[in-house]
Structure formats: structure tokens, C-alpha cells
Image (cartoon, rainbow, N blue to C red):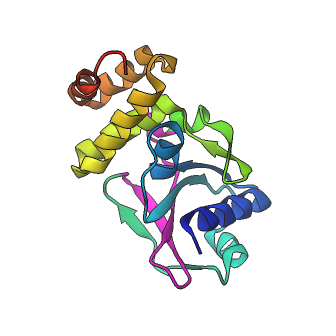
């Protein structure tokens, strides 16, 4: 099973049970920026009355739910991990938090065509903001690269005032400024 097939299965399952979601992480930064390989697919979900067990039932046998939910430090939320059969690929479902930015980016999510279906992604601006925040919390270079690549590709299409506002609140404005300065003019 490919990463795209696994992500598509999860999208179909979430849509079938009526769970509000958005596909985040490298799938969203790949959509807006420069594609790179990934070992997982990350979703933010608002379960409502749906249980993770219901989702897991729809994904069997292709994806198996790890019986232990985990608290994830970088995103500061509970996550559920699904393992793809016969491959190291994982799908992670992160519960939507009450944190102001998490709520805002979820509210702003957009429906796009990806993986041969309609799915929800955060906006390009919210991908940059979140990648900078993850980079700051987890010290992960790939998140900085993803933020830079989205900024490089999306350039003037971005609402920079919105990005600046959240980066100022999160204390990641210096990282954003460094990324923007590293992009040669005219590219």
C-alpha cells in the first residue's frame, strides 16, 4: 500500500462516518509547496459523537489501530496511530484542541481536489504558521524546509498580514523573517 492509498482510505472513512477533519503535515505542505517523501499521513479530527473504533472498523484490514492513544508533545494533543499492513507507513489522527490557533485553522480549512477525491486541507497560510510552530517546539528542520517551500511557491498569493499576526503571537516571527529573507527575489 502506498502512502497516497492509505491517506485516501482514511479520507473515505472519515467522510463516510461524518467526521470533520483536515489533512495536515507533509501532505498539506506538499500540496502548496515542494513535494517530499513522507512516512505518515496526519489528520486533525473533530470526532463529535463518532468513536475512533468506528473509524478503525472501516479501515480494517488495510490499517490497524494501535490500541494505545498517545499524548503528542509537539502538537499538544491526543493522537491515534494506524499502521498500514506490510509497510512502515502510519496514519495519525490528532484530536482538534481548544487552542485558539488550532480552532482558527480548522475553521478556515478549504476543500481541494487531492488523491483523486475532494478533501479538506488547512490554508497555505496556516500550513506555514503551523510548520513554524512545530519547528520551534520540536526543532525539526523538515518543518522549516516545508514552511520555506510553501512560502516560495505561494509567494504573493499569501495573506502575509495574517501569517505575521499569528507568528507574532507564537513567537516564530524571527523564523518567518529568516525564511522569507532566504528566498531570492524574483523566484
Q: In the image, is residue 99 part of the stretch drawn in magenta?
A: yes
Give how far across and how far down residue 76 sits, in percent: 36, 53
Q: In the image, is residue 87 part of the stretch drawn in magenta?
A: yes
- The residue positioned 60% from the left and 34% from the top of the image is 107
Give how far across and how far down residue 61 sits, in percent: 66, 84
* Nearer to us in this view, 32 or 126: 32
- The residue positioned 56% from the left and 83% from the top of the image is 85
- The residue positioned 57% from the left and 70% from the top of the image is 2
- Side (left or right) of 66 relative to 7: left
Give how far across and how far down residue 175 sits, in percent: 23, 30
Please identify the quarter of the rendering in which residue 55 is found.
Answer: bottom right
Please identify the quarter of the rendering in which residue 172 is found.
Answer: top left
In the depicted structure, whether residue 51 falls above or below residue 140: below
In the depicted structure, whether residue 27 falls above or below residue 51: above
What is the magenta range? 75-102
Instruction: Pick out the residue farthest to the right.
Output: 16
Please identify the quarter of the rendering in which residue 9 is found.
Answer: bottom right
Amino acid at each position: 500500500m502506498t502512502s497516497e492509498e492509505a491517506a485516501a482510505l482514511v479520507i473515505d472513512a472519515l467522510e463516510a462516518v461524518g467526521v470533520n477533519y483536515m489533512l495536515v503535515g507533509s501532505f498539506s505542505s506538499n500540496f502548496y509547496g515542494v513535494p517530499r517523501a513522507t512516512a505518515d499521513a496526519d489528520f486533525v479530527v473533530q470526532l463529535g459523537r463518532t468513536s475512533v473504533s468506528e473509524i478503525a472498523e472501516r479501515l480494517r484490514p488495510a490499517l490497524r489501530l494501535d490500541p494505545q492513544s498517545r499524548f503528542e508533545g509537539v502538537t499538544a494533543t491526543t493522537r491515534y496511530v494506524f499502521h498500514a499492513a506490510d509497510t512502515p507507513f502510519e496514519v495519525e489522527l490528532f484530536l482538534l484542541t481548544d487552542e485558539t490557533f488550532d480552532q482558527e485553522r480548522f475553521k478556515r480549512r478549504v476543500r481541494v481536489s487531492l488523491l483523486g477525491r475532494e478533501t479538506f486541507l488547512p490554508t497555505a497560510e496556516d500550513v506555514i504558521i503551523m510548520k513554524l510552530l512545530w519547528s520551534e517546539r520540536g526543532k525539526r528542520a523538515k518543518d522549516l524546509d516545508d514552511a520555506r517551500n510553501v512560502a516560495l511557491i505561494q509567494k504573493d498569493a499569501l495573506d502575509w498580514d495574517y501569517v505575521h499576526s499569528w507568528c507574532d503571537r507564537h513567537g516564530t516571527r524571527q523564523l518567518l523573517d529568516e525564511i522569507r529573507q532566504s528566498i531570492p527575489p524574483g523566484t
